[in-house]
Image (cartoon, rainbow, N blue to C red):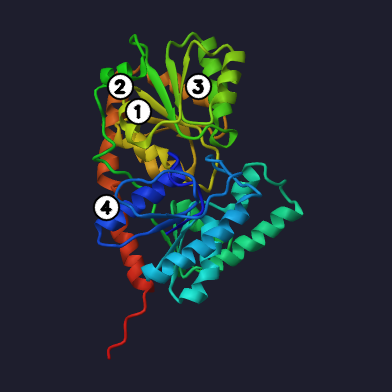
Amino acid sequence: MLAPTPYFADRGCHVRIYEEARALIAQGCDVRIVTYYIGRDMPGIPVERIPHVPWYRRLTAGPSWQKPLLDILLFFKTLAVARTFKPQILHAHLHEGAFVAMLLKPLLRIPLVMDFQGSLTSECRDHGFFKPGSLLEKCFARIEAVINRSADVIITSSTAGMRSLISEWGVPPEKVTAVIDGVDTHQFCPYPRQQARQRLGISGDAPVVVYLGLLNEYQGIDLLLDAALTLKGQGCNLRLLIMGYPEESYREKALHMGLDDMLTFTGRVDYGEAPLLLSAADLAVSPKLSLSEANGKLFNYMACGLPSVVFDTPVNREILGESGIYAAYGSAASLAACIKEYVSDTERLSGLARAARDRAVRLHAWSERARRIVSIYQSVLKPTPRP
């Protein structure tokens, strides 16, 4: 597995890599993750890291002009690992990983399975890395098209991503399979609410709304703060628990908006502690704006028995189904209205909580996802000729 990212850093992309690898190992696969030098190892999964690059310390998501150097090192590290590990499959996460694997494929003579979590060009544009319609955007789009064509099979983290590859990028339908994110429903499960609130130092009986994930405009955090301001102005009694990083700029913004009395920022949350801390809440929220990327945090919300308020997008509907609460896309006012409508309605919340947990267990367990990936591996491996 090629992971061109500072794995593991307690965020969505890394959770997919970790849970996927762990589930594949449980299915009998021998997995090595080759990744950047920063991040931490997770138990039970062997990790190989590129050499130390002292000036690169970034753990957050998004494009950077420094990453090409790290990806060159990733190429040579993967090649070195392959000489002793003798892999049968190159499983590449993200377009950068697939680009490195595309260069390795003719040297190793093994199939390339690309793990698509969203369009590289769209992500760079959404992060403000280049302007829409710019020459740089056109260059990235061409590179992305070449990478897409290089893979023997592409698995996508959403059905919307699969459709985009086929309709917008011209990838043959037989090369694309949707294997949406999943969740370990044994690890992520509801904990007693008071135990969780005591752990966070939250007192009182006011309803708690939680967000878990990266904090940036791309994830809709600015809209979430705008919604909180609306709710405060309407006299809505609740506490908004924002768990994730980097939080400094949003702490300051919340203070200037006069929201410090209704917000709690925890900073970065260890993946192992997330189920307990999520259980402090009555309602979860994810105002992510991307129309092409997956939304992995929703699986964790569901497994912990939390109803989720989200924007109405195909990705979110695919994950949550009837257990979701859908706000008008991109509208802070609609987000606030949905939170206000549901947060104090304990009967409706209880029904949605049961539906969310049931859907997570019934439809989104990683064990089933791993079996599908193994069958994809088997489909691209050439049969060994008989002597």
Q: Earlier in the sequence, mark 2 or mark 4?
A: 2
Q: Earlier in the sequence, mark 2 or mark 1?
A: 2
Task: Read off the residue under disc 2.
Answer: 196
Q: Categorize mark 2 by other alpha carbons within 10 Å: few (<14), some (14-19), many (20+).
A: some
In the image, 127 versus 234, the foreground residue is 127
Mark 2 element type: helix
10 Å crowding of disc 3: few (<14), some (14-19), many (20+): many
Q: Position of residue 291 (x, y in %)?
A: 54, 45
Callout 1 amino acid: Leu
The residue that label 1 is drawn on is 278
Do the numbered discs 3 and 2 sit on residues whose CB atoms are within 8 Å? no
Q: Are marks 2 and 1 in contact (CB under 8 Å)?
A: yes
Marks 2 and 1 sit apart, C-alpha to C-alpha, by 8 Å
Point 31% across, 66% down: residue:
375
Does residue 387 appear to the left or right of 283 in the view shown?
left
The three-letter code of the residue at mark 4 reads Ser
Give SS at disc 1.
helix
Q: For residue 237, which numbered disc appears in the image?
A: none
Which numbered circle lies on residue 367? 4
Q: CA distance from mark 2 to mark 4?
A: 28 Å
- Label 3, secondary structure: give it: helix
| Residue that badge 3 annotates | 336
| Residue 87 seen in the current view | no
Crowding near pointer 4: few (<14 within 10 Å), some, many (20+)? some
Q: What is the three-letter code of the residue carrying label 2?
A: Ala
Q: Secondary structure at mark 4?
A: helix
In the image, 200: left or right of 265? left
Q: Nearer the viewer, residue 355 or 129?
A: 129
Cα distance between the residues tagged 3 and 2: 25 Å
